[in-house]
Image (spheres, rainbow, N blue to C red):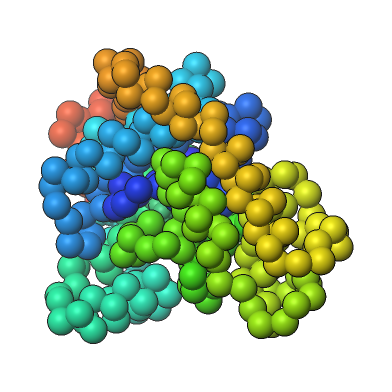
């Protein structure tokens, strides 16, 4: 059975971009079709300035929203990254396989580091090595597929490169993963700035729809979305990015096609109204379930505890195998290896 792994960072409140680009497919497709693991990747949230209490709060909220979005712990494994030591253990080994140049070429690193420097802040070393930790997340579970939004494709490519390189140098240890993405809305843009991704780590803004926004807030944000000059409703991501974004959001919410949908509209106002309603309706059951789950925190904790246990059991053998392959002495000698080495073989 195909193994799937994906994750979401608790660096801010989850957005419509997270949902359409990733989470919805995890619940609707991946958990049914594959042996799937979904993780709140809290270690990744420490790569930028953070408030410890907020990260904890957002981790709990992220996990609750994953369940609210329809992930079923009977079908898939939902857990928190820091509950499973294997991620950090493997990350170090992969740092010994990755190169400095490779890390500095990562687009997200370049963007985030530049933003941090503009603010006069310092760049954490972990921001540079973050894609290696992400590769460890994926490789530890032998994932075949990694369902992510467009912005993560380069990181999944790196995970592939590291898997291939490790296997070539030290013997076959890792499955080589591939990224998968949704047909539409793989990159939801900020409603106020359609040139930038709708990112949850950005400053709170009227261009970001959060999954827990009240219906009226969602309506207001969509109705105020920046559209392009012109009157005709066309679907052109390059020339009319604001309009294209709305059409893609509407298409993703209603299961339609942006190119076909545009023909149904003669005004921007109508398009905005329908898009707002479609988003509100899509989020309604998620918000309802979220409310129910918040009333039962012990249930969510139980799911995470069991999820971490299951995840640990899956990651452990692969990470142990990587430790042996790369040349680390096992803490407990394995009889077969000890015997061969005592006989001087290959030393
Ligand atoms: P992150 O918020 O960076 O932890 O992302 C979690 C998942 O959501 C990843 O698979 C991202 O690619 C996806 N994602 C985040 N923002 C967007 C967006 N604006 N459009 C599409 N997918 C997104
Ligand atoms: N880096 C991803 C993001 O910012 C989150 C993530 C961490 C992830 N580890 C992962 C996604 C492993 C997929 C697989 O969105």
Q: Nearer the viewer, residue 274 or 64?
A: 274
Q: Is residue 156 left or right of residue 81?
A: right
In the picture, residue 89 is in which quadrant?
Answer: top left
Q: Is residue 67 left or right of residue 266?
A: left
Image location of residue 148, percent across then percent down: 53, 52
Q: Nearer the viewer, residue 161 or 170?
A: 161
In the picture, residue 82 is in which quadrant?
Answer: top left
- Name the residue rendered at 31%, 64% in the picture: 203
Q: Nearer the viewer, residue 337 or 201?
A: 201
Image location of residue 288, percent across then percent down: 47, 26
Image location of residue 305, percent across then percent down: 29, 21
Number of numbered discs visible in the structure rendering: 0
Q: Which quadrant does the N terminus fall into? A: top right
Q: Is residue 55 left or right of residue 140?
A: left
- Name the residue rendered at 23%, 84% in the picture: 118
Tell me, yes or no, if residue 132 can be seen here. Answer: no
Q: Is residue 125 left or right of residue 235?
A: left
- Name the residue rendered at 76%, 67% in the picture: 267
Image location of residue 266, percent across then percent down: 81, 66
Tell me, yes or no, if residue 198 can be seen here. Answer: yes
Q: Is residue 117 above or below residue 197?
A: below
Q: Is residue 191 above or below residue 340?
A: below
- Name the residue rendered at 25%, 48% in the picture: 43
């Amino acid at each position: 059975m195909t193994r799937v792994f994906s994750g979401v960072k608790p660096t801010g409140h989850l957005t419509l971009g997270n949902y359409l680009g990733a989470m919805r497919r995890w619940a609707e497709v991946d958990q049914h079709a594959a042996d799937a693991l979904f993780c709140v990747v809290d270690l990744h949230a420490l790569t930028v300035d953070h408030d410890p209490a907020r990260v904890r709060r957002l981790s709990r909220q992220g996990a609750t929203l994953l369940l609210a979005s329809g992930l079923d712990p009977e079908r898939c494994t939902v857990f928190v990254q820091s509950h499973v030591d294997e991620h950090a253990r493997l990350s170090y080994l992969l740092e010994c396989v990755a190169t400095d140049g490779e890390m500095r070429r990562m687009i997200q690193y370049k963007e985030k580091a530049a933003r941090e420097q503009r603010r006069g802040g310092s760049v954490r070393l972990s921001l540079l090595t973050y894609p290696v930790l992400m590769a460890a997340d994926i490789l530890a579970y032998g994932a075949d597929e990694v369902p992510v939004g467009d912005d993560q494709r380069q990181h999944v490519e790196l995970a592939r490169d590291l898997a291939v390189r490790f296997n070539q140098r030290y013997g076959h240890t890792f499955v080589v993963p591939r990224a998968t993405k949704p047909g539409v809305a793989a990159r939801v843009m900020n409603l106020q700035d359609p040139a930038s991704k709708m990112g949850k780590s950005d400053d709170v803004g009227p261009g970001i729809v959060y999954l827990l926004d009240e219906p009226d807030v969602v309506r207001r944000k969509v109705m105020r979305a920046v559209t392009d000059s012109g009157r005709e409703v066309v679907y052109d991501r390059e020339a009319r990015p604001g309009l294209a974004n709305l059409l893609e959001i509407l298409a993703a919410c209603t299961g339609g096609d942006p190119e076909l949908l545009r023909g149904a509209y003669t005004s921007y106002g109508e398009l905005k109204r329908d898009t707002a309603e479609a988003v509100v309706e899509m989020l309604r059951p998620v918000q309802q379930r979220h409310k129910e789950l918040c009333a039962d925190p012990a249930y969510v904790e139980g799911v995470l505890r069991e999820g971490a246990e299951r995840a640990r059991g899956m990651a452990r053998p692969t990470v142990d195998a990587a430790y042996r392959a790369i040349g680390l002495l096992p803490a407990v000698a394995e009889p077969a290896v000890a015997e061969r080495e005592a006989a001087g073989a290959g030393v």
